[in-house]
Amino acid sequence: MESNWKLVLLLWLGSINAEFSDDWSKLQCTSQNTCRECIQQPSCAWCTKPDFSGNSRCFHLISEDSNYCPPEYSYNPDNMLMILQYKSLSRPRVSPIPAESYTHRPTSSSNTSLEEIVQFAPQRVNLKIRARERYTMHAQYIQVEEFPLDIYLLMDFSKSMEGNSEKLTRLADSLAKVVPNITTNLRLGFGSFADRTFQHAMSLSTQTNQFSSLVKKAVTNNFNASGSLKTGVLPVNSTAGLQAIMQAIVCKQYISWRENARRVLIFASNLELQSDEIKFANYDLCNWGGGSVNVARINEKVKQNSINLLFAVTADQMSNYKKVQDKIEGSYTVMLTPDSSNIVEMVKEEYNKMSAVIQLKDNSSDGITINYYSNCLDPSGEFKKTDRCENVKVGDIVSFKIEVEVTRCPRDPEDWKQRLQIYPIGVNETMYMDLEMLCSCQCEQKGYVENAKECMGAGTYKCGICECNRNHFGKHCECSSEHMYNFMNTLSCKRDPEDTSVCSGRGICICGKCSCQRDTIYGKFCECDNFSCPLSHGKICGGRGTCDCGVCNCKSPWNGDACEKSVLKS
Ligand SMILES: *[C@@H]1O[C@H](CO)[C@@H](O)[C@H](O)[C@H]1NC(C)=O
Ligand SMILES: *[C@@H]1O[C@H](CO)[C@@H](O)[C@H](O)[C@H]1NC(C)=O
Ligand SMILES: *[C@@H]1O[C@H](CO)[C@@H](O)[C@H](O)[C@H]1NC(C)=O
Ligand SMILES: *[C@@H]1O[C@H](CO)[C@@H](O)[C@H](O)[C@H]1NC(C)=O
Ligand SMILES: *[C@@H]1O[C@H](CO)[C@@H](O)[C@H](O)[C@H]1NC(C)=O
Ligand SMILES: *[C@@H]1O[C@H](CO)[C@@H](O)[C@H](O)[C@H]1NC(C)=O
Ligand SMILES: *[C@@H]1O[C@H](CO)[C@@H](O)[C@H](O)[C@H]1NC(C)=O
């Protein structure tokens, strides 16, 4: 006997597994009680039909046909994308990069520099989307311009660097002459430090010639000037260096770091840098917090500001800085040599590594998932889940599919409308997406009736159902809390306390009131109908009157219990 039970149970489980997914999605619909809950489930629609007789107003679109709910009453808001702004992608700009490195050769036009550059499209979209459904849209990126590069040279002007002053001017010269061959989208700037003072000299600028002559002037003034003009006379230590690095990173308003540029800070020194904490009193320039600075703090700021720190140091300091380098993300150590070609080579390598990559990012919040797909320049390739493509050259067009999903409706309806930004990293362009989550039904927002007759005057008729007022409940708000006492008590539904059945056996007792089986049955106890009247001539009330709760109302001139008599005849 017992083993038979097990067998039955196994069979039953087997069949559940087979139909699980179908039944599950159906149940996801039918278990929802309001329109808003309904449409927050995928593939569910809500029926607003007034005299709806189906099982559940929330139904599974795939399982039910139009007999279940006529289309005009079926509420099933659809995801919708509206492209509000689509400026076409620009053509690539003429640049000093050799023509053979273009995929699509740029058309030569003297006017391109005047046009607005568009590298990412569309620019503005509106997406209406239901929770737990995915929407995929397309976007395109073209590399038109070279990536911007900002280089700030921070030089050690302390006395100990005197012998290296020539190297500093050579380095500035190379930066100004060679780096424009890597990218024309370049800005150079510089500053110096000595005796614990950081001196910002030139903000990042496209004037590369000016850069090298100003550096030369500053170096000469510092090391070759006589007497009072000389600065680097006091001994300096770690303190000055770390402090200057910190300021060059955070004093954005002076340095003018571009938002979207690859930022390189070259620190040229022979100073021994220590990685322990150095405390400062009352030092708060550019709001970096002041108080103290150490290598860990610099690492934090470097990450925050996406700056690559390049230590260009004398041979004796190489091993010291290699240790510091390990503690600062994205930092490098190179030797300060007379011709400085190694430093420029390093800058070039890093720049190329970064500029050949296009990566999309967004600022979506909790509850919104955005996935990116691309075939990354392979026209016959499959779209794979990735937000980045490599080896992108000027002129290349990269296609992205952007898949948006609202994983759940936020609690606060204010959050049902959100503005998101989707943008390629390092490019000063963005797509604004106004996301409208379809988390509630129109019929819940307007056109509803308060204290409606469908709800016994005790509730709001919304989307075909009653939302009962306080202290009322039931499908039609027919119950109120004062009935609660009688809720289980059927006495008030019996005509005679001795009756064995409630409501004359022709209805059910709800909240102490009879709800009669059929519309033709009525009365407090369902005791009335219009067909239980005396017959005459084989018809109810002889066909000469109407039947009302067992009594014939005879038409003149007829009278009698069954309207069988005529006043005229007697
Ligand atoms: C340059 O562009 C401007 C604005 O788009 C246009 O009015 C002008 O005719 C163009 N000039 C040439 C030489 O193409
Ligand atoms: C930069 O490129 C130009 C043209 O390709 C070349 O003539 C020049 O020598 C290069 N400059 C340096 C410093 O490499
Ligand atoms: C500074 O003077 C030294 C010799 O005293 C000279 O070799 C060097 O070139 C000068 N530097 C500058 C930048 O003028
Ligand atoms: C660096 O020098 C300053 C004074 O010039 C001193 O207060 C500080 O303690 C020194 N720091 C280290 C790490 O030696
Ligand atoms: C980015 O572009 C906006 C307008 O398109 C401009 O106002 C802003 O200055 C640009 N930022 C940078 C860092 O280029
Ligand atoms: C995303 O960025 C846009 C534009 O700056 C801003 O309006 C929006 O509030 C941001 N969204 C989130 C979720 O932070
Ligand atoms: C029963 O008859 C009365 C009297 O004609 C009428 O008012 C009432 O509407 C009828 N009820 C039904 C359910 O037909």
Image (cartoon, rainbow, N blue to C red):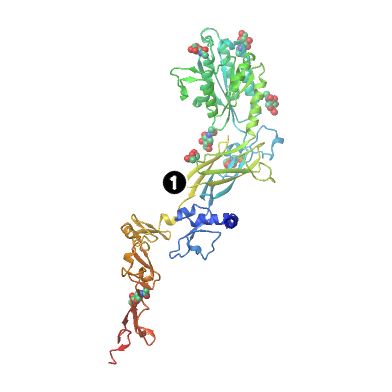
The residue where tag 1 is placed is 411
Q: Give the residue at the far top of this rendering.
A: 227
Indicate left or right for 46 with 121 as reference. left
Q: Secondary structure at mark 1?
A: loop
Note whether ligand 6 is within 8 Å of mark 1.
no
The answer to which of 29 and 192 lies nearer the viewer is: 29
The answer to which of 416 and 198 lies nearer the viewer is: 416
Q: Say which residue appears at 39% left-offset and 86% top-offset.
A: 538
Indicate left or right for 269 with 463 as reference. right
Q: Give the residue at the far front of this rendering.
A: 1
| Vertical position of residue 327 compared to residue 361: above or below | above
| Vertical position of residue 14 compared to residue 203: above or below | below
> Residue 248 location, x and y as percent?
53, 23
Indicate left or right for 53 with 19 as reference. left
The answer to which of 110 and 24 lies nearer the viewer is: 24
> Residue 534 location, x and y as percent?
35, 82
Q: Residues within 10 Å of mark 1 (few under 14, many from 20)?
A: few
| Vertical position of residue 316 compared to residue 69: above or below | above
> Residue 405 location, x and y as percent?
54, 47
Quadrant occupied by the N terminus: bottom right
> Residue 512 location, x and y as percent?
33, 63
Residue 393 seen in render = no
**Mark 1 is on which residue type?**
Arg
Q: Give the residue at the far right of this rendering.
A: 100
Q: Dividing the picture into quarters, in which one does residue 493 lie?
A: bottom left
Residue 176 seen in render = yes
The answer to which of 396 and 12 lies nearer the viewer is: 12
